[in-house]
Each structure stands twice: as structure tokens, then as C-alpha cells.
Image: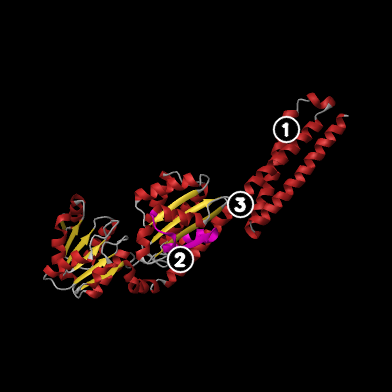
Amino acid sequence: MKILVIGLNHKSAPVAIREKLACSTEEIGRALACLKRMFCEAEFVLLSTCNRLELYCACSRVGGAADEDLAGFLSDFKGVPLCEFRPFLYVHNDADAVRHLLTVASSLDSMVVGEAQIIAQVKESYRLACAAKSTGKILNRLFHCAFATSKRVYTTTSISTGRVSVAGVAIELAMQLFANISLAKIVVIGAGEMGELLVQHLLKVGGKDITVINRSYDRALSMASRYGIGARTWEELWGQLARANIVIGSAAVQDYLFKKDSFQKMMDRRRAGSLLVIDIAVPRNFDPSVNEIDCVYLYSVDDLSDVVEQNRKARCEDVAKSMGIIHESVADFMDWFRARDIGPLIGQMKEKFSQISHNELQHFFVGARQEASCREMMEIMLNRVVNKLLHCVIKNVNVVAKENGASEAARLVDSIVRQADEIRMETRCNKKDAGH
């Protein structure tokens, strides 16, 4: 078996590419179902966030899914020509794939190192895979290893302190660009998890005039009541933008909400001066050409890089400590993963030992001893001896696997199996000779 991950993220691909491949919850379910039909023996988990799309797979090394197969699937499923995104894809195999997932789950591969949202997103992707029945023994263990590693990183380092979310960094950017945020009229588009994080950060830095607008007015109203802010209907969106100083887009949509021409008309009518727009949604809420309009300053999620870099430098020690934790977890997982290939050989060894003990009993209980009353007790005793010897052998095999690798341990077990088979055959031959 092999483990591989194929994907792209904010470091390998621009947002213009990422938004084309982003998958909704419903699309993830359909994609996993399609993959299971195509590769019925393989396991899959699909992770899609604003900063990454990654497909994790566990399958046979011979005849299983290859990275080109999975890249082609993503192209067909999303209707995006492979040539458009192939240069941005990365592929990791086995230990590298395990290390990548653990790094992602621990937020070390995030745009904002230490952000807490990614582990919830990884858990949700795994939940969807379980619901689609596309996981199995290998990915189940791998993802639970990722959850445990992430928890250890967060509880033993201070990596999650400070502004550690894209929402927090967006507000930090707004504070750098807007002199007094407490005087600004702020409109937040979207009342989902990211929208709620934005409101929380805005209130912390002194934002007072905050309005949330969402397609579902009830959801916007619910959020507004929890935080003591304003809520408006979707139909009032343009009117609110015309009076805003800061607009932050976080709505989950598949196409731009705002195009240049319509936005220009709104700007021509407004009297509120310059407008700061921060678009942290993927796919984006604002057409990039909106930035060409006079007095509009549009920043996408990829434009937060300067603030992100400051965040990364401040956490260098925590990153180093976290990577040490991840290294240990990867080693433990790979010990288990490689040992899986030894399992069938261990089974063969147990079977050969059992056959040898059975043959020896048969050889002993012949003639006058054939009806001896102690036969049952001797059989129980012999099985105990064989099991104890097996336990010693398996324990030493595990030591060899840990110190010298699974392949060396497999060679050792294979050698024992062959020798045991020779002994078994000798015992059978001796029994036949005795019978004659």
C-alpha cells in the first residue's frame, strides 16, 4: 500500500487558480463517491479551504491510483483544463504525505501560522469522507494521528497566541490602512464562520459601527443579536456599501458578487470618500478589476502576505518545536504503516508453527499411546509453549522493524517462515516413515 496527497495551496497557486478548484460540501461528497467508483479498493479524503485543495489517497502500489489519475479527475470534475493548474500542483508520497497532513492540521502550513480554523476544516473533511464511506483503516489512523498531533502542538507551544486567523490578519491590515477604526462604518458580507470571526476581531479592536449582511437575513440577525451589531437584508447591500468606509467580503459564492461596472456606478453615487475593500473569500466576492476604480482599495486574501510574514517571524521558536513534535508523530505512524506489510507474513509464521506442533503431537500419539488420556492436556500445554515462543519472535521482529526498517523485518520473518516450512515437511516425512 502507498499513501499520497496531490494538491495546491496559497504558496503554490494564486487565488485565481485556487478559486476555480474550490469545492463546496455537496461537491466534496459527489467527488468522493465518484473516486470510490473509479478506484473501489482505494481510500480518499478531500480537503477544500480558502487556501488549499488537497486530495489524500491510500491505495495499492500496483494498479492503484496514480497522481496523474487524480489530477485528471480534479480537472474533469471541476471542468478546469489540466494545463491551467498542473504547474501549481504538488505531490507527496508516504512519509512526506503523512508529514504534510500533520503540518497542515497543526496550522504550520497555513497562511497565518497558528490559526485554529484549519483543524476544524480537516476534521470536517474527514467527517465528510466517513459519511461517503471513502476512508479505510489507513486514512482513519492517519487522520486521527493528525488530530492528536495538532492537539499536542497547540497545548505544548504558544503558537496559537496573537492574531492567528485570516480574519485577524484582515482586521490588522484594516487598522494599518485606516487611522481610527472606531469611527469607520464597516460592512461585513457573510454570516458564516469567517464572518463571525471578523466581527469578533472588529469588536476587539474598537469597531463600533458594524453591519453584517447575509443572503439569509435570519442568520445575519442572529449573529447581530449575539454581538450587539447591526444587520441588514441582502436587498440593502448596495445602499450599505455606498455609505461604508470598510467592506470585508467573506460570503460563500461560486461567482463574483461585485463586478467593475456595477461597482463603479455605486462609487459614482457615494459621498463617503475612499473605500477599503478586503476580500478574504475563496472563490472571491469581488472581481479583481474593482481595484482599478478610483478611491477603491481592494485587497484579496493573497495580499495579506506582509502581515502574515510578520506573524511567521514572531513564531519561529514555536514552529521549530512544533516540527519536532510532527517528526515524532510521522515516525510513529510510519512504523505502524510499514509493519502492516509484515502482518501477512506473521500470519504465515503462526500457521507454520501451529502445523509443526500438530504434526509432533500426531507423531507422538501413535501405537499404544494413541488412546492416552493425557493427550488433551499435552495439546493445551504445547499450544501455550508455541504461543510464548511466537510472542518472543514477534517482539524481536518489531525491534528489527523499528531499528532497521520494515523491509529488513519482512526478510527476517520470511526466512523464519521458510525454515518452519522445512521443519513441518520433515515432521510429516518422519511420521510417514514411522507408519511404514
The residue positioned 83% from the left and 36% from the top of the image is 429
Q: Find the distance from the CA under tag 3 to the CA under tag 2.
A: 35 Å
Q: Find the distance from the CA under tag 3 to the CA under tag 1.
A: 31 Å
The residue where tag 2 is placed is: 87
What is the number of the mark on residue 259?
none
Q: Main secondary structure of the magenta part?
A: helix
Sequence-wise, which precedes: disc 3 or disc 1? 3
Q: Quadrant of the C terminus?
A: top right
Q: Is residue 85 visible?
A: yes
Q: Which residues are magenta?
A: 78-101
The residue where tag 1 is placed is: 379
**Residue 271 locus on image (x, y percent):** 11, 71
The residue positioned 14% from the left and 65% from the top of the image is 242
What is the number of the mark on residue 339?
3
- Which element is circle 3 on? helix
At label 3, counting other C-alpha atoms closer than 10 Å, the crowd grade (few under 14, some 14-19, many 20 or more) is: many
Q: Amino acid at mark 1?
A: Glu
At label 2, counting other C-alpha atoms closer than 10 Å, the crowd grade (few under 14, some 14-19, many 20 or more) is: few
Q: Amino acid at mark 2?
A: Pro
Farthest residue, direction top? 371
Q: Find the distance from the CA under tag 1 to the CA under tag 2.
A: 65 Å
Q: Amino acid at mark 3?
A: Ala
Q: Quadrant of residue 78?
A: bottom left
Nearest-to-viewer mark from 3 and 2? 2
